Amino acid sequence: MTTSSPTLAEADAARDQRATGRLPFAWLLAFGVFLAFWLLAKPYLPAAFDYPKAHVIKLAKWISAAMKWLIDEASFGLFSFTDLTRFISAVLDVPYTVASSLLSTGFLEGSGSSAIQIVPPLPWIAVIGLVMLLGHWLGGRSLALLAGACFLFLAVFGQWTSAMITLASILVAAPLGVIFGLLFGIAAWRWRWLERIIMPLLDLMQTIPVFAYLVPVLFLFGFGPTAAVIATLIFATPPMIRIAILSLRAVPGEIIDLGHMVGCTERQMTWRVMVPAARESLMVGMNQVIMLSLNMVIIASMIGAGGLGFDVLAALRRLDFGAGLEAGFAIVALAIAMDRLSQAAAEKLSAPSTENSASGFISRHPYLIAGVALVVLTSALGYVVPAIRTYPEALQLSTGSFWSEVVAWINVNFFDSLEAIKNAMLLNVLIPFKRFLGGLPWLGVTALLGFAGFRLGGWRLALLTSCLPLFIAVTGQWEKAMITLYLCGISAVIASLIGIPIGIYSATRDRVWAWVQLAIDTLQTLPSFVYLMPAVMLFRVGDFTAMIAVVAFAVAPAIRYTALGIRKVDPKLIEAGRAMGCTEWQILTRIRLKLALPEILLGLNQTIMFALSMLVITALVGTRDLGQEVYIALTKADTGRGLVAGLSIAAIAIIADRLISAGAVHARRRLGLE
Amino acid sequence: MTNPEAKLVCRNVWKLFGADAAGFLARHGGHPDAAAITEAGLVGAVRQVDLDVREGEIFVIMGLSGSGKSTLVRLMSRLIEPSGGDVLFKGENLLKVSEKRMIEIRRHQMGMVFQHFALLPHLTVLDNVAFPLDIQGMSRAAREARAREMIELVGLAGKERAYPRQLSGGQQQRVGIARSLAVEPEIWFLDEPFSALDPLIRREMQDEFMRLQTVLHKTIVFITHDFDEAIRLADRIAIMKDGEIVQAGTPEEIVLTPATSYVAEFTRSVARAKVIRARSLMVAAQPGDAEGPTVSDRSNISDAAPLFLDGVGHLGVTDDAGKLIGRLERDAVVSLMLRG
């Protein structure tokens, strides 16, 4: 024993050394080769630096042509493809018309400007009352007050009509998203092959930027609220499918056995056992769908959803900050109300209902009765007192001009310092980095990414991480992809530099963490559009503005994952560290941060994903990256161009995601966490 | 071959995990050896199990985790499809019946209790117990009446409106038991029903279980990893290791003549006097034994021992009918108890 253990230890040490020694060497070699290639190869191999235009695969054109064929020629025998899309539009148009008539326009006779209102929309007081009743039923008085206040805000600040249009879209899209998601989820849970098809599609759909969806939808379904509802559905359903699959899978095996033992048929198994047993986590999906719908409905204003998103968009185009900010605040109010209400609903509906023992219909359904009474009463009164029907304009507050003045004041007083900051950043960081990335040879980058994929995850990952950049290059997107990468990279780095220290600081302080958590939770419920407004106000259009908006949007996951990772570190290890006499600094650097590394890496991953998704939206403030490409495609209804650019962004996202995930797995294994 | 009073019979039952397990079994004539299984890349979860569960007995399958006991009980109800063999329930081969017939059998003739209770979180105690009847399509009034009866039986009356999460572990398992009994099953599977409970509660539930059985006389397959529990409850025990039954028999047989060193490992710490019954230790009766104190041939030695405190040298042993069938010698009892 005594003779063998030193040799064993030596062997271990030698292996460790080899393992740790070999890794940097391989990396160094790879970087060295890359560097040499970059610096020396240009005169000999220009094609490796600028992808030759002659060899660009015209994927965009092909897609556009296919799309054109689909619309003009494709037919299923009895009916054509266009008939199908028109049919879908027509079907979806029915619930949307009902919802928007009820909330915003009233039921109309005739069309266009000659339309006559037969039945007016719900009075604003009735809507606020209904929301408060809902809040009270779901979460008691405080929720009722919060929801009521949010909606009152909409009325008082003159955003009522737009907000109701937005709300109508959500009321149509969210339930449909939940239903479709659940049905698909159940189907994928039941049939493995379907899951195998669906899962990669879902991955892709979540990484393709939202704008890219809008282009084909615009093409197939035209411009208008119905098309926007469809785009919203496409965007908000995938997470529900995923959550449905996961929560059905999480149902304990014993419950499934029970279902079989009591002799359930397939149908009973699904609806009487599985879905109820998974109810709690399915409800989380509902909240997600609602919030994503809101986000998307705002963005879909570009294809005619109207509502608050359109107000922001229009204000951005006019550079009317006051109006934009007002609409932005309205979105925030709506988002907060919807988030809190749907969270309370999730809790309420997943907890078993407390049996209401009252006998009569009225006493069993007090909220329903109160709601109906409220609607009838206010509608009737609305004919007499117009102020009940529509919020009186005289009482509206407009802060638009106030905000415009604030912005003007800031610009007058701080213009120089803001400009100085902006220019310093642009000249010293943004532009050099942009030039650096722009000068890199695409062939070298592709090879290097392939190498990284191989080191971190083996051949399959290497294949993925080298084919995707190749796709970007051969479709002629390389230059724009590099601009995307530069903005996204810098923003992610800055977001991490801000977020990780905040995460570290708040992780060990419970009270601070509670506040920080509330803040980032609220930030994350806000549609991405909202982030643009303040950035544009202060810094006008351009890369720097885009960067600020992206950082603001992407900082939340950096904070969250860092803090959660550190908080998850086993307290026994901290205790052990203390017992060994570690200083607080040592505990932080040697124990907490080390063990939280995988989580922090995941946070970085999320930060990059958030940054990419926001980046596309910043195309509105004049970036020149792939996002702009998608945006241009949208305005020109050029499906191929939009999709190819969208897929390229997805490719960047997938490369970053897979490499970082593989790195996190590596780290976890090295730390013995797996 | 088949025991006439056997309710459930397993004949050469196999469960192999891996690709084409059934074909592999067929190629090996239904009896592959362990080496062949490993070589084919399969995992033998249950191997060559033969057993019969008799009407009205408590048949305990005991094994450590990974021994295949939970798989075996699921093969018996075809929750898991066996790779080969026959499972006969009341003479009907379950592996040959249609899906529809299987649903019928499960609905009306089988009941199962689960280790982690498997209660549906969204239903009240009453609805949970009535759930199997609801699935059968029984009317609300009828199923609730029946469910109330069952809840009464397991001593949870008054808790009908509670939800599972509001109950303690022991209470939750009582609900599980009531639910499994609601359909009046002919065979009752209990898959480690008390393993998730605290030791004290476990003891209490075992007593409760024995009380229920004296009332109900069910045919029971009881799975456990706890040898003491097996000894305490079983009429017969099958001990499993690596998917095989290494020994099957009454608790006495297993404790007295462990078939392998593996079984002996379990029996070593068991107090013999608590397992061995008067019948096994008695010698031929002599005239006049009926005059003195007597014990039932079923009572175990540790229960009979105090009777010797009066200074008698031997006890008469009687069968159920009260007929004298043998005598229990003081020396034999003392030496058994001294051996532990």
Image (cartoon, coloured by chain):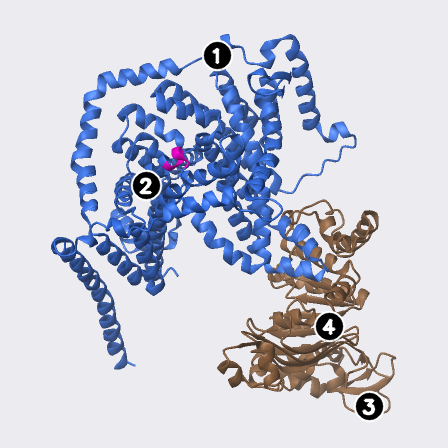
Q: Residue at left 28%, top 62%?
A: A455
Which chain does tag 4 point to?
B
Using the image, tell me which numbered label, if any, was put on residue B285. 3
Q: Main secondary structure of the magenta part?
A: helix
Q: Give the residue number, with chain letter if any, for mark 1.
A: A396
Residue A72: where, in percent of width, then height? Answer: 50, 42
Query: Hue of chain A?
Result: blue
Q: Quadrant of residue A673?
A: bottom left
Q: Earlier in the sequence, mark 4 or mark 3?
A: 4
Q: Residue at x 28, y 28 (%)?
A: A541
**Which residue is labeled 2 in the image?**
A626
Q: Residues within 10 Å of mark 1 (few under 14, many from 20)?
A: some
| Few, some or many residues within 10 Å of mark 2 (<14, 14–19, 20+) | many
Instruction: Indicate whether residue A635 is drawn in magenta.
Output: yes
Q: Which residue is mark 4?
A: B94
Q: Between A76 and B123, which is closer to the camera in this rendering?
A: A76
**In this rendering, the label closer to the viewer, 3 or 1:** 1
Q: CA distance from mark 2 to mark 4?
A: 62 Å
- Element at label 4: loop
Q: What crowding class fits label 4: few (fewer than 14 Cα within 10 Å), some (14-19), or many (20 or more)?
A: many
